[in-house]
Image (spheres, rainbow, N blue to C red):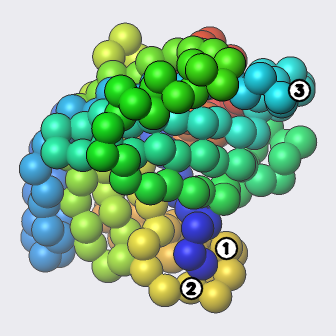
């Protein structure tokens, strides 16, 4: 499932300490927290915001140690609640050059999301604790293991979450740019 992302995101309503303790007890490996500044762009040839449902994002990320260029197309395209996305991402040596390149090609700035992320990994699941400026605390569970289908990956995430025995906040069916722009799909 290379180039496909399957994840679930939740609002984190309480301290993440209990969940981190549970992950540590399960042998999860904790990463170092890093600041990620994500700048989202709109394309001049196809307005990502034009449809009733937004399904595409182009992003430049500047992080503590590296920068990247990323494009996501979420599916099902016309549904508010998405199941997965195509994700094409590559590191870039000079984020400023990429930003200038996009400007020269008439890509326009949509929003910037500034967050601190601490990522843990356990059982083929990346668990990201995100503190997003102006939006709050979130937790994302992204499938990183082996699966033949999106349904298998989704089921593995759901089994993992259920096995934690921790109550999470509302599930968020939106990306941070949706939330930052005030155009978020429904929660469940």
Measured from the top left, where is residue 89 in percent x and y?
49, 55
Mark 2 — residue? 147
Q: How many angstroms separate mark 3 from mark 2 (CA)?
A: 32 Å
Quarter holding residue 55: top right
Residue drawn at 57 percent across, 57 percent down: 88
Can residue 136 be seen here? The reply is no
Residue drawn at 53 percent across, 28 percent down: 101
Mark 3 — residue? 51
Q: Nearer the viewer, mark 3 or mark 2?
A: 3
- For label 1, count other residues whose C-alpha is less than 10 Å away and answer few (under 14), some (14-19) or many (20+): some
Can residue 26 be seen here? The reply is yes
Q: How many angstroms separate mark 1 from mark 3 (CA)?
A: 25 Å
- For label 3, count other residues whose C-alpha is less than 10 Å away and answer few (under 14), some (14-19) or many (20+): few
Q: Quadrant of the C terminus?
A: top right
Residue 150 is labelled as 1
Residue drawn at 36 percent across, 47 percent down: 92
Q: Is residue 80 above or below residue 148?
A: above
Measured from the top left, where is residue 36 in percent x and y?
29, 33
Q: In the rendered view, does 49 fall on the left or right side of 170? A: right
Measured from the top left, where is residue 171 in percent x and y?
54, 41
**Callout 3: SS:** loop
Residue drawn at 56 percent across, 75 percent down: 2
Measured from the top left, where is residue 56 in percent x and y?
71, 39
Q: Is residue 100 above or below residue 155?
A: above
Q: Is residue 116 above or below residue 153?
A: above
Q: Is residue 98 above or below residue 164?
A: above
Q: How many angstroms separate mark 1 from mark 2 (CA)?
A: 7 Å
Assess whether mark 2 and mark 1 are in contact (beta carbons under 8 angstroms): yes
Q: Earlier in the sequence, mark 1 or mark 3?
A: 3
């Amino acid at each position: 499932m290379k180039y496909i992302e399957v994840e679930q995101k939740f609002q984190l309503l309480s301290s993440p300490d209990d969940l981190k303790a549970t992950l540590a007890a399960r042998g999860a490996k904790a990463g170092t927290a890093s600041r990620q500044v994500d700048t989202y762009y709109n394309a001049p040839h196809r307005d990502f915001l034009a449809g009733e449902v937004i399904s595409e994002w182009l992003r430049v990320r500047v992080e503590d140690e590296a920068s990247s260029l990323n494009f996501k197309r979420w599916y099902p395209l016309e549904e508010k609640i998405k199941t997965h996305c195509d994700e094409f991402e590559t590191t870039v040596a000079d984020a400023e050059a990429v930003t200038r390149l996009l400007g020269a090609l008439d890509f326009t700035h949509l929003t910037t999301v500034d967050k601190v992320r601490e990522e843990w990994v356990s059982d083929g699941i990346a668990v990201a604790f995100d503190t997003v400026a102006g939006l709050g605390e979130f937790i994302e569970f992204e499938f990183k293991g082996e699966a033949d289908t999106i349904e298998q990956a989704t089921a593995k995430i759901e089994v993992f979450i259920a096995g934690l025995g921790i109550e999470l906040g509302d599930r968020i069916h939106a990306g941070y740019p949706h939330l930052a722009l005030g155009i978020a799909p429904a929660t469940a």
